[in-house]
Image (spheres, helix red, strand yellow):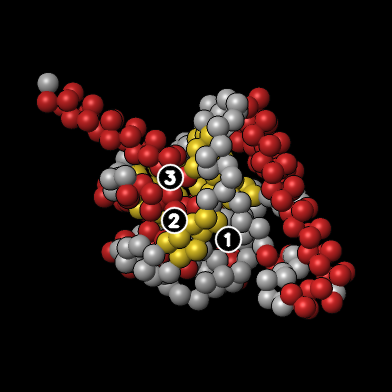
Amino acid sequence: MSVFFITGVDSRIGKTYATGYLAKQLLENGVNVITQKLIETGCDSKIAEDIVTHRHIMQIPLQHVDLQQVSCPFVFKAAAPPYIAASLENIPLYPARITVATQQLKLKYEMVLLETSGGIMTPLTESLLTIDYIAAQGHPVVLVTSATLESINHTLLALQAIAQRGLTLHAVIYNQYQDPAQSVDTDELTPDQVLQDEQLYKESFDTHRVRTNLLQNTRLYLQQYLQQHHPDTFWVELPYISFSSQSVHYQKSEEDNKDDNNSNPSYNIEKYAQEIADNILYAESLYKKIAQK
């Protein structure tokens, strides 16, 4: 009956994909797991879009707890921070209702992955930040980050806030995806078109080089920071993920098979899920042995 908070250093950082894919891997390792969304904004449906995405990635249908809105009690249409969205729709937002929903899920499942809304400092109400809610619940934190221009700054601020509140940081998930819209894509061009525009080719090459260096150097810096300040925290690589209603595919990175000297446990997300599953199954086995005595 474990609960992990899956939060991020910013919005659109990859929390939903990380949550869904981790849940999928836990399922494959024999863990009865469910995902929960803290609050959903910018959604026209009664069922949170992120919950729907989780189920697609997990390759399972919507569950009874989804249809009953237990997996996400608050869904707002406005694409705004939760407390603003609630105010616009004149709906009171009670954090205690989220806590009750989590408790209901814990009764049915071995593990709950609770994805937050926005970044770790996002206000839930005018007086309650996401990180304050996490601290009050006391569950371990999984922080999702990626390689953008502000990733190091945002990640260090999040890590310092986590440390100041004495939270347990179980893992940092590094999302390797980078928005292709930010680069010049020559894949759609013919060789003749590329050759005819040397400037376009140069821009594409330079952009790819910068993005690759950003990905590698951000990873290295954050790993070194974790090694110094959070040595027991898992470093987890989230691969490039594509999915449909029938299957989920991912592309391995150079880090998946890399054996480095980083003291932090450095796993791909499949191995990380197996580690969690082994601990849960071992704890259950130990509990049963004690109960039989």
Which badge, 2 or 3, comes first in the chain's sequence? 2
Disc 3, disc 1: CB below 8 Å?
no
Residue at point 39%, 35% (across, down): 275
Q: Name the residue under label 2.
A: 20
Residue at point 58%, 42% (across, down): 255
Name the amino acid, label 3: Glu
Q: Where is residue 95 in the image (x, y as percent from the top left)?
A: 48, 52
* Image position of 170 with respect to 117: above or below: above
Name the amino acid, label 1: Pro
Q: Mark 3 points at which residue?
A: 270
Name the amino acid, label 2: Gly
Closer-to-camera residue (91/189): 189
150 left or right of 119? Answer: right
Which badge, 3 or 1, comes first in the chain's sequence? 1
Q: Mark 1 points at which residue?
A: 82
Q: Determine the secondary structure under disc 2.
A: helix
Q: Residues within 10 Å of mark 3 (few under 14, many from 20)?
A: many
Q: Where is residue 72 in the image (x, y as percent from the top left)?
A: 42, 60
Closer-to-camera residue (3/81): 3
The quarter of the picture where the N terminus appears is top left
